[in-house]
Amino acid sequence: MRKPARDVRDVPQSRRQKKELSRRGNELVKADGFDADNGSSRARTNAAGTALTRPNSPVIDFDGLSRPSFGTRERLEEDDEGKAARLGRMKGAVKTLLECIGEDPNREGLLATPERYANAMLYFTQGYQQNIRDIVNGAIFQEGHNEMVIVKDIDVFSVCEHHLVPFTGKMHIGYIPHNAVIGISKLPRIAEMFARRLQIQERLTKDVANAIFEVLQPQGVAVVMESTHLCMVMRGVQKTASTTITSCVLGCFERREKTRNEFLSLVGVNRR
Ligand SMILES: [Zn+2]
């Protein structure tokens, strides 16, 4: 059963309606223990008669946000006062960090560092607030095209959730359409959405593949990522030249070795 890429839930809503939907969504999870990992999609209707379908997806929630949690929704919906309070708490935490490493947070060079770092961290994690539907924005075209499409060497900057330091690298995304193609610039933006948060490379690779599979419903998706982790090269083992490669293949890429190998040789991962 194929669902349309955009549906009634994509109609822009007022802030209040969004809050109501978000609240109801949370209740649904609590009420029936229905989460991304189980069962098929279920359709619900709210008081306004809007369908609330919770997709059977590990990455995208019913309102287009990804892997929502109380904290990220709160961040998305907070007012100016809330934003200021959040920044204040973050600045205090960074000041504590500076003191704990033996620095003087009051010396000139460090005076503005807590605020800079807090803002940088919010930027590095802005993907939590992004909505997959806003990113795709209807750029799905029925072209009747069924050949492999690849975007390679997408720069990816993410933050390791175990050490809070960056990992950076290249992502290669391929898919085989089921008639519909997605605007080519959307693939790096989807990668960016999932990279701008605390991640591990394995999950980032899977999140991107699953999200594309869900919004486009192609015959298959393949994602490969090669990256360098600062937590690995700057500390511990200090293997500065090491690269970590992860991949996730779905649909026909998973089923057919020939298709998978064609993708891998086109993106050059088989070159070594
Ligand atoms: Zn790490």
Image (tube, rainbow, N blue to C red):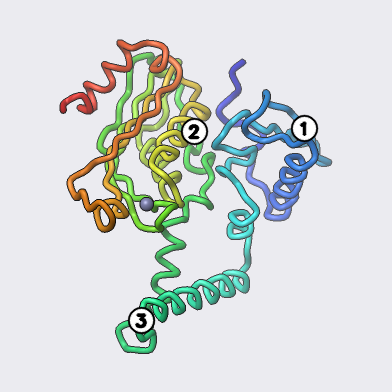
Residue 70's image quarter?
Answer: bottom right
Residue furthest front as drawn? 237
Say left or right for 5 vs 182.
right
Instruction: Report the residue marked by disc 2.
Output: 211
Label 3 CB, ligand 1: below 8 Å? no
Dot 2: element: helix
Q: What amino acid is labelled 3 in the image?
A: Gly
Residue 234: x and y, percent? 25, 58
Q: What amino acid is labelled 1 in the image?
A: Arg
How far separated are the C-alphas under marks 3 and 2?
Answer: 44 Å
Residue 143's image quarter?
Answer: top left
**Mark 3 or 2 closer to N-term?**
3
Q: What amino acid is labelled 2 in the image?
A: Ala
Instruction: Report the residue marked by disc 3.
Output: 102
* Number of numbered labels in the structure image: 3
Residue 133's image quarter?
Answer: top right
